[in-house]
Image (spheres, rainbow, N blue to C red):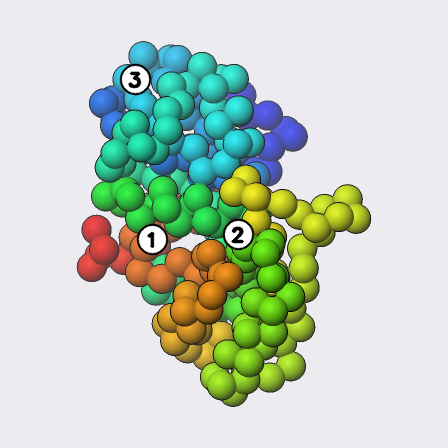
């Protein structure tokens, strides 16, 4: 029976994604509330069917959850290449390009996703957008000199003719949020992103920027769960 405390759309996406898992796989586990539901459903299946899986987690929180549920969690370096990564997203566009990092884990999430044969996103319908950018774009920066990094981001955006983009230092409980890698997050209130490729290249070229939350041409399948318990699949065949 489904748990009434679990969002039915997230649960539907998670259940559909769990069906993609096969015994023997090396699996990447995402971060966030939808990925958390996926890990719960995954553990249920592993225990029911005795699947042999080895997992790499994208955050300390997910590693703790998965280990606590009895899943085998190892370092990515111990696993090498992964078969499949399942993760959530903050925005999914029609080409399955994503904004991620709402949970401040996009650095590890991108490393894990791009070390996988396949990245599959699990999300609810509220994440599907025509164009990326309404969700503030997370950019992970090194603490050393972060205000000058922010200034360089402002200048680089101006060169892309992006003006009027508030850049907010992410806080948690009144203090700057520190990521699992010991860095800070700047959230860029872009409103909409006209050219995500160009923006991604520009941000990646700025000293002090560790990683931005644009996931372009990485995700090949998005499973969108619906509140009625059904799930729809959006596929990027060229990435499969
Ligand atoms: C964490 C992420 C999450 O996947 C993203 O924020 C979606 O989270 P949720 O499923 O809670 O909406 O990118 O860094």
Give the class, few, some or many, for how many residues have Cα within 10 Å of label 1's Cα (few <14, many ≥20): many
Quarter of the image for residue 170 reads bottom right
Percent x, y of residue 138:
55, 59
184 vs 155: above or below = above
Tell me: is circle 2 under 8 Å from ligand 1.
Answer: yes
Tell me which label, 3 or 2, sits earlier in the chain: 3
In the structure shown, which secondary structural element does the residue marked by tag 3 occupy? loop
For the residues marked 1 and 3, what is the alpha-carbon distance in whole angstroms? Answer: 25 Å
Question: Do the residues under discs 1 and 2 have CB atoms within 8 angstroms?
Answer: no
Residue 81 visible in the current orientation: yes
Q: Nearer the viewer, residue 5 or 62?
A: 62
Give the residue pinned by disc 2: 101
| Residue occupying the far right of the picture | 174
**In the figure, is residue 105 to the left or right of 72?**
right
How crowded pointer 3 is (Cα within 10 Å; few <14, some 14-19, many 20+) is rated as some
Q: Which residue is mark 1?
A: 219
- The residue labelled by disc 3 is 51
- Across and down, in percent, residue 47 comes to 39, 13
């Amino acid at each position: 029976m489904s748990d009434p405390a679990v969002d039915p759309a997230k649960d539907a996406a998670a259940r559909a994604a769990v069906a993609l898992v096969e015994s023997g796989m090396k699996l990447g586990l995402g971060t966030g509330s939808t990925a958390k539901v996926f890990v719960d459903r995954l553990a249920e299946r592993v225990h029911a069917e005795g699947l042999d899986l080895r997992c790499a987690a994208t955050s300390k929180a997910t590693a703790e959850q998965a280990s606590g549920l009895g899943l085998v969690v190892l370092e990515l370096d111990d696993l090498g290449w992964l078969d499949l990564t399942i993760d959530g997203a903050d925005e999914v566009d029609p080409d399955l390009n994503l904004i991620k990092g709402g949970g401040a884990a996009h650095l590890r999430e991108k490393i894990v996703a791009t070390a996988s044969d396949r990245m599959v996103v699990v999300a609810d319908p509220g994440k599907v957008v025509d164009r990326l950018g309404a969700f503030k774009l997370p950019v992970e920066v090194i603490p050393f000199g972060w205000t000058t990094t922010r200034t360089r981001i402002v200048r680089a955006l101006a060169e892309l003719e992006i003006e009027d983009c508030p850049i907010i230092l992410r806080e948690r409980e009144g203090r700057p949020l520190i990521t699992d890698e010991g860095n800070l997050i700047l959230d860029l209130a872009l409103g909409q992103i006209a050219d995500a490729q160009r923006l991604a290249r520009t941000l990646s070229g700025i000293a002090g920027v560790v990683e931005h939350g644009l996931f372009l041409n990485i995700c090949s399948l998005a499973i969108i769960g619906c509140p009625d318990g059904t799930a729809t699949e959006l596929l990027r065949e060229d990435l499969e």
